[in-house]
Amino acid sequence: MSVEKKRYTGESIDVTFSKERCIHAAKCVRGLPKVFNLKKRPWINADGETVDKIVEVIERCPSGALEYIRKDGGKQETPANETTIEAPSIGPIYIKGNLSIKHKESTIKCTRATLCGCGSSKNSPFCDNSHVNEN
C-alpha cells in the first residue's frame, strides 16, 4: 500500500496532495491563499496563480505532502545536492534530499519529509502532530 495522493489539475501545473503526510504547517495557505483555500472545494486551485509562485510555495511544504508536476516545460523539483536533517529537541524531524522512505509495504521516493521525532505518531514514520497534544 502506498501513500494516497489526490491530484488537482491545472492548465500548466498539476498539484498533488497527500493527506497522510500533511502536518498542517499551513505554509501553503498562508503563502498563496488564492491557490490553497481550505474554505473552498476543491481546496486547491492549480490555476489560481502563476506556475512559478505555486512551485515556490509547494517547495516550502516541510512534509512533502504537496508536490507538483509542471506542464509548461519548466524545471521539476529536484532533490537538494546533499541530504539535510533538522531535528529540534521536541517535535518533527525535517528531512530534505533524495529520499527513499519505507512506509507500510512500499517505499516512497520524495525530496521532502517530516518524520516523527517523539514516537507518538499513529502514522509512523511520518509526523502526525501527536507531539502537540503531549505538551
Image (spheres, rainbow, N blue to C red):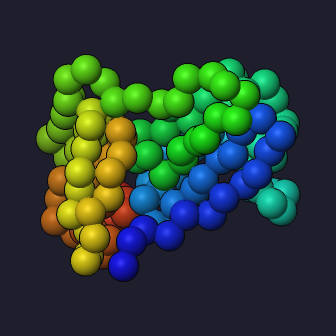
Q: Which image quadrant is residue 73 in?
A: top right
Say which of 109 and 124 sits in front.
109
Image quadrant in which the N terminus is located: bottom left
79 w.r.t. 125: above or below:
above
97 w.r.t. 53: above or below:
below
**Residue 5 location in percent, x, y?**
55, 64
Residue 17 appears left or right of 81: right
**Residue 75 location in percent, x, y?**
55, 23
Q: Please say whether residue 3 is visible from this viewpoint.
A: yes
Query: Which residue is rendered at x = 58% and y = 56% of the image?
Result: 17
Residue 89 appears left or right of 110: left
Residue 109 appears left or right of 69: left
Query: Which residue is rendered at x = 31% and y = 24% of the image?
Result: 80
**Residue 41 location in percent, x, y?**
83, 62
Query: Which residue is rendered at x = 40% and y = 29% of the image?
Result: 78
Total numbered circles: 0
Residue 78 appears left or right of 44: left
Residue positioned most to the front: 73
Q: Please say whether residue 86 is visible from this viewpoint.
A: no
39 w.r.t. 93: above or below:
below
**Residue 84 location in percent, x, y?**
20, 28
Query: Which residue is rendered at x = 68% and y = 31% of the image?
Result: 54
Image quadrant in which the C terminus is located: bottom left
